[in-house]
Amino acid sequence: MFGTMIASIMQTPPETHELQGQIDALEERLKQMQKLAAIGELTSTATHEFNNVLTTIINYAKLGLRNKDESNRTKAFDKILTAANRAAKITNTILAAAKNRKKEFEPTNFIGLVSDSLLLLEKELNKYRITLEKSFPEVLPEIMADGNQIQQVILNLLINARQAMPGGGKLHLKISYDEENEMVDLLVRDYGCGIPPEKLPHIFDRFYSTKSGPDESGKGGTGLGLASCKTIIEEHKGKIRVESTPGKGTAFTIKLPTVVRAKLLEENS
Ligand SMILES: Nc1ncnc2c1ncn2[C@@H]1O[C@H](COP(=O)(O)OP(=O)(O)OP(=O)(O)O)[C@@H](O)[C@H]1O
Ligand SMILES: [Mg+2]
């Protein structure tokens, strides 16, 4: 055994080992930075949404003060209560993300994760006149996941879809259970600009972007969104696929292992 090891070391020049070591260290640093960027993006999305909620609360409080009649005041209080409940949910999401900085895979309710992500983007999607079409199953097995990271993937895909439809449009989200492979699938289909075939092979590359910079909501243009989606999905032993027709739209599918499959994979590794 020693003989083989020495032989293989002798075949590789020492500079190559050193370079490989440096590449590994840089890859590791990049991963850490992507994780921090993910928390940063989640925080900025949430802050933006939180401000929207505050605007609603302030406007309805003013309305309630101006209109002394019972029905208008009740309406104002109702709206304030709904908005405040949403604000509480948003801060909880951020607190959970901040607490859970290390990688933690645990049985996770995927429909809950997708719904939380939609909650964060609800106002933004409304603003850009995106109509959501959801088809979620009644029951779904839990996936083995780091919830924060998967939420980051979902947010990236939704934001890209929204940006592909600057004049508004339909966004179709479908969750399903692939029983045969013990995987849970999420389809994110937009009816936006689509991706030309020559660009498609590059979209998962780090820093590849066709956007001129962040849009007015401060999102897009870094070219790290899909690269981190790919890293995260691969770390979860899942799959990410894309199909696109220019001028018609794009469909991303992510597949994630259920708890059952994750256990099987672990046993066989
Ligand atoms: N749903 C989509 N429809 C059309 N093009 C898309 C879609 N999703 C991604 N793309 C293309 O893939 C490129 C890379 O996407 P990615 O999310 O990695 O970067 P980005 O959105 O430009 O910037 P950011 O890192 O800030 O998200 C985009 O610039 C765009 O050209
Ligand atoms: Mg993006």
Image (tube, rainbow, N blue to C red):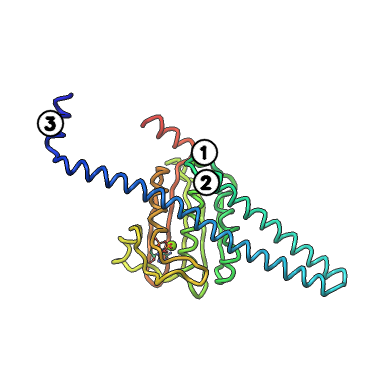
Percent coordinates x, y for residue 5 in the rendering: 17, 29
Residue at (73%, 71%) from the top-left corner?
A: 59
Q: Alpha-carbon distance for marks 1 and 3? A: 43 Å
| Amino acid beneath label 3 | Ala
Q: Alpha-carbon distance for marks 2 and 1? A: 8 Å
| Amino acid beneath label 1 | Glu
User: Which numbered tag is attached to residue 181?
Assistant: none
Secondary structure, mark 3, is helix
Residue ID for mark 2: 147
Labels 2 and 1 touching (C-beta < 8 A): yes
Residue at (54%, 60%) from the top-left corner?
A: 44
- Foreground residue, 67 or 102? 102
Q: Alpha-carbon distance for marks 3 and 2? A: 45 Å
- Foreground residue, 51 or 76? 51
Residue at (48%, 46%) from the top-left corner?
A: 184
Q: Residues within 10 Å of mark 3 (few under 14, many from 20)?
A: few
Residue ID for mark 3: 7
- Foreground residue, 28 or 106? 28
Q: Is residue 243 left or right of residue 132?
A: left
- First in residue order: circle 3 vs circle 2: 3
Secondary structure, mark 2, is helix
Q: Residues within 10 Å of mark 2 (few under 14, many from 20)?
A: many
Quadrant position of residue 195: bottom left
